[in-house]
Amino acid sequence: MFCLFFKGKLPLIAAVAFFCCLVSARVVTAKTLPENPKEISWHISALMVTYDNERNLYIAEDNVVITGGATRLEADYVEFSNKTKDAFAQGNVLFLSGQDSITCNAMQINLLTEKGTINKGTIFIQENNFYINGENIKKTGEFTYSADKGSITSCEGDDPDWKISGKNIRVTVEGYGYADNTVLWAKKLPTLYSPFLSFPVKTKRQTGLLFPRVTSSDKKGFEYEQPLFIAISRNVDATFYANYMSDRGTKVAGEFRYVLDNASQGSMFLDFLDDSKLGDGTDDTEKNTYSYDSTPPRTNRDRYWFRMKHNQDLTNGFSGKLDLDIVSDADYLQEFRDGFTGYDGTNEYFETVFGRSLDEYDDTTRKNSLVISKSWSNYYFNAQALWYDNVEARQEDTADTTLQTLPSLELDSARQQIKNSGVYYKLDSEFRSFYRQDTDQEASTPLVSGQRIDIYPKFYLPTRLGKSFFFEPFIGTRGTSWFTDNFTDTDGNDDKFRTRATYDLGAELSTSLNKIFTLNNSFAEKVKHAVVPKLEYSFQPDASPEDLPYFDAIDSIQEENLLTWSLTNSFIARNMVETPEGTQSNSYKEFIWIKLYQSYDIDAEKDETQSKPWSDISLESEINPFEYFSMDANIDWSPYTNHFTDTKIGATIKDHRGDSIRTYYRYTQDSLETSIDESLETWYTRLNLQLTQSLMAYCSYEADLYTNKNIESRIGITIEKACWGLGLEFKDTSADTSITFLVTLNGIGGFGTQ
């Protein structure tokens, strides 16, 4: 084996170069790449190396390897000029530049400028698994390529699942690629022709157009939504959207994202549409309707939606959270649920990034808040300004009596022991300033503004009775004061300052019956069955006199004298598992949990108007004995009607291949105070079949069993390959029927219709 080492422009004789290579080869390859390319150290190793004096070339044969900085050239035969750094390589050529590579039959290249020609080669861009093939490829720069004729794909192998062939191909890594007269091939079958193609070749965030969205609907007509991404800096970027709708106009939108530090970041969105249609019935046709029965008529054409979430790390352990949600009209979020900036996509983004969701799309009172908080080991402080935007009141220009909190201060404590006394306590305390834009003294419950202070400490004394029973009495004391300047009670008293003192007390008595079963099988080594019977008592005197203002539930604490029994069953499996460090440890899993409970109202027997002291019998359960099966249920049963009043049951079965079925049933009986139309009975089922490793078929069905109407049904297939994907879905709802078709070519993007 011969190896040569060159630095700069000083050629050395072969013997000296060989000696230097042996002494310093390891050192050279470990050096940091110099800023000046001319100072790169070049190292040649081969089975045979000769020097051609006439052409001033080093000729290396058999297992040739040339390295310099982040560049590596391998071939069967190489001619190399240490003066110009030009190299000609032939036979099993492999050229590595950073993470990208070129394989070819022959190559003529300058190792400093990385410009040259490639004969029958393949360029591989590792970051997005991108291949460029061509017979005569020109490397026009470190990150630029061109070819008179060739193909592109993200599939591996000589016979890729898809490729796009074309002429006059130009590619810039971290930029875009362009090609003329392109043909999309599925294996060896031509499927689509385009006279021109532009595609991204990006491995990092970079300004440019993103793939568009094309749909069609009855209300909006043909729709084309084009996003433009702008990389402002490493921690700031934005996306602008132009959404053309043939029947409605063009909706423009912007999305701005920023990261200040590890704990501080934010995102804001703004949509605007000059709508060509009104929602007051004037533009409705037999086929299209632009209004909703659940919302007031929409007479505005200028429509907008601004939403924002921000997390901020403050000093001394404080943190802040800001949520804003302002929409022009009550119909907007119902109409624009889909799309890049629609409600569904925005809500999913906020949940993923910030862990906080938006109000429901059909909620016409939108929550806006600013929260500053801090936690200690046993205490928690929270300051909040809360503003609900009543969209309907603003839209109809009517009185807005929505209750706002500007601001609230809370100081709470976790349950903790008072020194060594055996007594535990917890504290809930708050100050709230309530505000209404419009007040209403004539309402059945006067709607006023004011301030309230509430302090509620609670004390516990956990005690053991013998060896088997646990007894814990508690007592809570509550002091509340109000200040209002516009409240008059039923006696005509308009005192601004009012107070209330109340208390609550109770106790619980429980025991635990345990039995351990030894299985020593694949399911578990041991199983613990625990049965916990519990009896609870709670008493609260009536604390809702008519001479007090009402803002929320704290102001109207109803009398309570309840006795509740419950029976909880749990099964816990124990297995021995091996830790990553190679040691053994116990692993516990609760695979069955069932709780049955019911309450008895002691005062109901004293009240002649109350004939039902017993509450419904309630059952809650979670069952997951195996990895491939889980079930949950919440059931309420009335002892007076002998019927179920509320039922929620769901189960999931799946296998190791990926097949699964999820079914969910829900029933809610109408109450005596409401009409029968408020009963609810629905059933939802989804079946996923993993037919092959890459092919999945699915169908889902949701029905309203009470009205015998279809809510939504879907059937579709998806194909997920390493370099491409396909989705085909048919969806039928009570309001619309649609077909969605989407093809994704990894590294290129996707296309389809809906």
Image: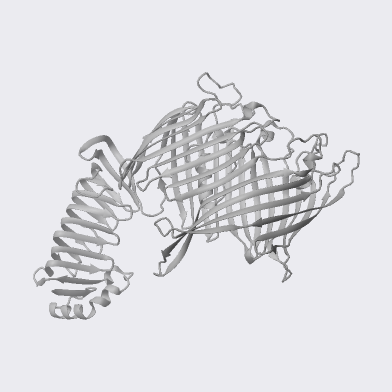
- Residue at 44% over, 58% down: 519
Q: Which residue occupies the foreground of this view, 313 or 682?
A: 682
Rendered-image quadrant of the N terminus? bottom left
Q: Which residue occupies the foreground of this view, 553 or 350?
A: 553
The x, y position of residue 257, in whole percent, is 51, 51
The x, y position of residue 32, in whole percent, is 32, 72
Horizontal side, residue 62 vs residue 719: left or right: left
Residue 449's quadrant in the figure?
Answer: top right
Q: What residue occupies the far right of the structure in this picture? A: 492
Q: Which residue occupies the foreground of this view, 272 or 471?
A: 471
Work out whether residue 157 can be spotted: yes
Rendered-image quadrant of the C terminus? top left
> Compared with residue 246, is residue 749 higher up or lower down, i.e. above or below?
below
- Residue at 44% over, 46% down: 629
The x, y position of residue 244, in whole percent, is 46, 33
Residue 524's quadrant in the figure?
Answer: bottom left
The x, y position of residue 575, in whole percent, is 44, 61
Q: How many marks?
A: 0
Horizontal side, residue 132 vs residue 242: left or right: left
